[in-house]
Image: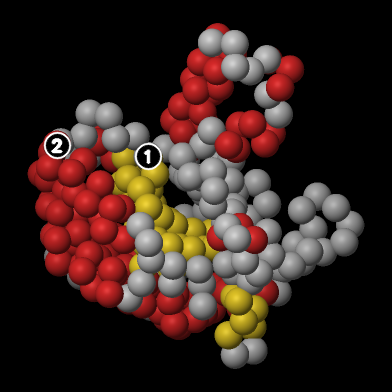
Amino acid sequence: MSEADNPPAASGTFTVPRHVAIIMDGNGRWAAARGLPRAEGHRRGVEALRRTIRAAGEIGIKIVTIFSFSAENWSRPASEIGELMGLLRRFIRNDLAELHKSGVRVRIIGEREGLDPDIARLLVEAEELTKDNDNLTLVVAFNYGARQEIARAARRIAAEVAEGRMKPSDVALETVARFLDAPDLPDPDLIIRTSGEQRLSNFLLWQSAYSELVFLPTYWPDFDRAALEGAIREYQQRERRFGGLVAKTGS
């Protein structure tokens, strides 16, 4: 049975979405509001990520996708990019063993070509070490952009057609989905964005077609279990119709 076949879990008085995606926004503004350097905001953001992964597992969420570093983030100052890469290195080196012990499987989506070799090796190490875990799947969108992902899928489909393994008339919605970065995973039931901004910012554009969106004013470093459960409760108040007239449960 694939992860897409698992029914939504239940916790307490509310049904838990199986797949929650998070745009972790507001580290810099959190730091600025406290007169701290942006780097401190990013460090506190890593602490919030640890809390969130732990809470998600306890609540019963099966898949968490995080927008950790976008394809557009390379335009930030070199010093900030260096700090973010350093945090990634430390997170994998310091937290990977604990994630593995907790039964978390790490998946990476995004473009890997052109990454620093040590970063690329760490990503592979995280996936290989945890590939057999099944308590929770942590999908890390790194060097990721949704438009870029769709363009990659289009190139792969075009190659199939050019080599005669597929006809243009064979290309359907399911075909495009099959060539995305993680085609075996279900679409997010819920997408949360912190910091008060209300846009997807090139995140999971294909997969979010029928996701419920919850925008929170909380800056990411202050995000905790209570905020996660609050977002889930808001999600549960929505009537999900997927373009039809009859509401459905799950995605």
Q: Is 122 situated left or right of 207 in this image?
A: left
Residue under the point 51% across and 28% down: 153
- Residue 135 in the image: above or below residue 123: below
Q: Position of residue 28 (x, y in %)?
A: 25, 57
Q: Position of residue 241 (x, y in %)?
A: 79, 58
The furthest residue to the right: 245
Foreground tag (2 vs 1) = 2
Q: Position of residue 82 (x, y in %)?
A: 12, 45
Quarter of the picture containing the N terminus is bottom right
User: Which of the labelled discs sits on residue 72, or is there none?
Assistant: none
Q: Quadrant of residue 40?
A: bottom left
Q: For the residue labelled by badge 1, is the local secondary structure a helix, a strand or a loop?
A: loop
User: Which of the labelled discs sits on residue 117, or is there none?
Assistant: 2
Q: Is residue 210 visible?
A: yes
Comparing 80 with 128, the one in front is: 128
Comparing 129 with 11, the one in front is: 129
Q: In whole angstroms, how far apart are the C-alphas of marks 2 and 1?
A: 15 Å
Residue carrying label 1: 110
Q: Amino acid at mark 2?
A: Pro
Residue under the point 59% across and 52% down: 187
Q: Is 215 situated left or right of 88 in this image?
A: right
Residue under the point 64% across and 31% down: 175
Q: Residues within 10 Å of mark 2 (few under 14, many from 20)?
A: few
Q: Quadrant of residue 157?
A: top right
- Residue 76 in the image: above or below residue 6: above
Q: Position of residue 59 (x, y in %)?
A: 49, 81
